[in-house]
Amino acid sequence: MRWRRSLGAVLAAAVLAVAVPGAASAGTVDRGTGHGGWVPAPQEPFEQPAGARCDFAVRVEPVVDEVRKLVLDEYPDGSPRRELYTGALISEVTNLETGATTEVDASGTSLVEYGTDGSMTWYVTGPVLFGFRENGGTLPRGIWIIDGVYVVEFAPTLEKTVTMVHGTTHNVCTDLD
């Protein structure tokens, strides 16, 4: 139960930082922008071969990308310790074998904490698109829209553990068969 209170506090702070202009910028790090504020965080299109995420080769490409990030804390070497991501992100997912496509809304808000060992923890509200390889975490192989309030822990090997507080999961590969 204690972790739920902590998650609730983190998500409340994240929502406040997104909803109130300037709320999170007062103590942020100047990342060479001169203001230490929000910066664009464009999502790159990518492809996966057949069998990597879906039974068929797939391409994911943003069609609306207004994602931005805010660096909240850094390690002494200047690498990010905590970042906040938010903004509209609609992606088109295409079965490269049949040409079938679907659009997915991945416009969630995420507070990301980076470990020094290559691990990450994402505290999320709303929908985000995640890929899972075979035996790569708590969901089967696929391209998943996870929506709700949840945490995704990435091991240094990129294996993912999803802890759902409330929400849904949907494998987008099933929309493209």
Image: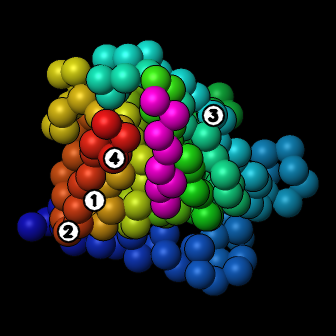
Amino acid type at mark 4: Asp
**Residue behind mark 2:** 166
**SS at mark 4?**
helix
Question: Which one is earlier in the sequence, the residue at label 1 or at label 4?
Answer: 1
The disc, 3 or 4, on the residue closer to the chain's N-terminal end is: 3
Does the residue at mark 2 contact the one at mark 1 (Cβ under 8 Å)?
yes
Q: CA distance from mark 3 to mark 4?
A: 19 Å
Q: Which residue is mark 4?
A: 175
Magenta residue check for 103: yes
The mark closer to the camera, 2 or 4, is 4
Q: Tell me, yes or no, whether the two marked residues, 1 and 3, touch with CB atoms within 8 Å.
A: no
What is the crowding at mark 4: few (fewer than 14 residues within 10 Å), some, or many (at least 20)?
A: some
Find numbered disc 2 in the image and state the secondary structure of the residue it sits on: strand
Magenta span: helix, strand or loop, mainly? Answer: strand
Locate residue 85: give its quadrant. bottom right
> In which quadrant is the C terminus drawn?
top left
In this view, the mark in front (3 or 4): 4
Residue placed furthest toward the right: 34
Disc number for residue 150: 1
Give, as a three-letter code, the residue at label 2. His
Against 17, residue 168 (above or below) is above
Tell me the residue at 19%/38% (across/down): 139
Identify the magenta region.
Answer: 98-105
How far is mark 1 from mark 4, CA to CA? 23 Å
* Earlier sequence position, callout 1 versus callout 3: 3
Residue at label 3?
45
Callout 1 amino acid: Tyr
Label 2 CA crowd tier, 10 Å (few <14, some 14–19, many 20+): few
Mark 3 or mark 2: which is in front?
A: 3
The local secondary structure at tag 1 comes to strand
Left or right: 128 in relation to 67: left
Which quadrant of the figure contains the N terminus?
bottom left
